[in-house]
Image (cartoon, helix red, strand yellow):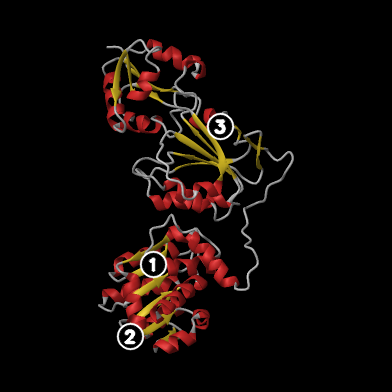
Amino acid sequence: MARGSLHIVGIGPGVLEHMSFAAKRVLEECSFVVGYEKYVRQIEYVAKGKAISFPMGKERERVEVAINLAERGNRVALVSSGDPGIYGMASLALELAEGRDIDVEIIPGIPALTFAASKVGVPLGGDFSLISLSDLLIPWEKIVFNLDRASLCDVSIVLVNPGSSKRRYHLAMAANTILRYRLPDTPVAIVENAFSNGERIEVTSLTELEDREFTSMNAIVFVGCSRTRVSDGRMITDRGYFRKGPLVNEVELEGSEDIERASLDFIKRHLKAHNFSHMEKEIVTRMVHAAADFSIASLVEFKEGFCERASEVLRNGGRVIVDTQMALSGISKAIADELGVEVKALPKCEPPSGYTKSAWGLRLLKDEVAKSLVVVGNAPTVLMELKRLADEGVKPKAVIGVPVGFVGTVRAKGVLKELGVPYLTVWGNRGGTPIAVAAVNALLRLACG
């Protein structure tokens, strides 16, 4: 039996004049054509083999059918809109074809973002970032984090899968996130069904997307950068020939008599993409303010009723143990005293072998830990010592664990999951005493009502 082959074919926008000669040739020569029913219909006038169509979704089933046919010695085309290697079928097909006795070939196509971009000018004249708003396979918080980092950079942003009947406000939340760093009048273009029936084109501004209900999965959204302008209804992003963009987008609010309040209001306004409770939002707002870093909002985790437990400790005049004198100095003494809360730092003394000074300091306060909110913004070894105390049956009421750094920090934060107590952390290397102090002060304000 002849060795079968699987050809993953990018059909671009699905019209003949925008399809490559290679794609057309393969579609004409294959015995079977497999794909989403819409895409199969688009190329049925080209394909000569038997068509096998699938409804929306069923991506894995499509690939399995195509591979099984190829294993029987057939030449099979698996069609994908745009380019199959960009949010297309190629990655899944290559994964499932591993170890199978078939040849696999990828036939590139015009990517959806480029044929859509051509309808509105040159929105992608320089560097750009491509982000899907679909959270079917990726957690929404990861999408928001990616949006935040891309928006901070001075590059154009392409948003695909911007909405559906079940994701009506994903685009609005994405716009709210991007507006953390970009001007409200930043040019935006929306292209729906480019080169197809129902084609729709709109050039607008970023702020107009904030409250928009959006349900079209077929649209592609282009968000400009500092070098993007609109001329004769078209977006033009120059490569820097005429204007040099900034290294990063910078935020400068209008002058205000109450600088802190203006900053906090701005932060709260741009946290719409996150599903925080009222108490969580107040705490995160203060943490973001302390670091001037919105990405913290995507990295923070509140676990096991942290806010309620920590507030209970503070309202009942409990104890807060912090890992540094710097943290002790930063916590609001006036509010703590009003609530009858004792705040103390770890004692510093020469530790025995096998201990850091901070870890030994916590060990010396072993009898007080069980009644306390323990706050760590600097020393990851304190979190490791908390785990040892927990193994001995001594657990704090709650923990704020946000040490910063590159050595032992990530591993120490992972220990929080093993303590069995409510905690607040910022995953990854970010953190630090200012963020820890901001969280405590926010809790103290909340406890005061």
Q: Residue tagged by mark 2?
A: 316
Q: Residue at x 25, y 77 (%)?
A: 393
Q: Residue tagged by mark 3?
A: 117
Marks 3/2 in contact by CB < 8 Å: the verdict is: no
Q: Is residue 412 visible?
A: no
Q: Is residue 420 visible?
A: yes
Instruction: Label 2, secondary structure: give it.
Output: loop
Instruction: Label 1, secondary structure: give it.
Output: helix
On the image, the x and y values in percent for residue 339 come to 40, 87
Name the mark nearer the viewer: 2 or 1. 1
| Quarter of the figure with the C terminus | bottom left
What count of labels does the image hold?
3
Q: Residue tagged by mark 1?
A: 278
Instruction: Label 3, secondary structure: give it.
Output: helix
> Label 2, label 1: how many angstroms apart (C-alpha)?
21 Å
Lower position in the chain sequence, tag 3 or tag 1: 3
On the image, the x and y values in percent for residue 386 come to 35, 74
55 or 358, nearer to the observer: 55
Q: Residue at x 38, y 77 (%)?
A: 374
On the image, the x and y values in percent for residue 92 come to 36, 33
Tag 2: amino acid:
Asn
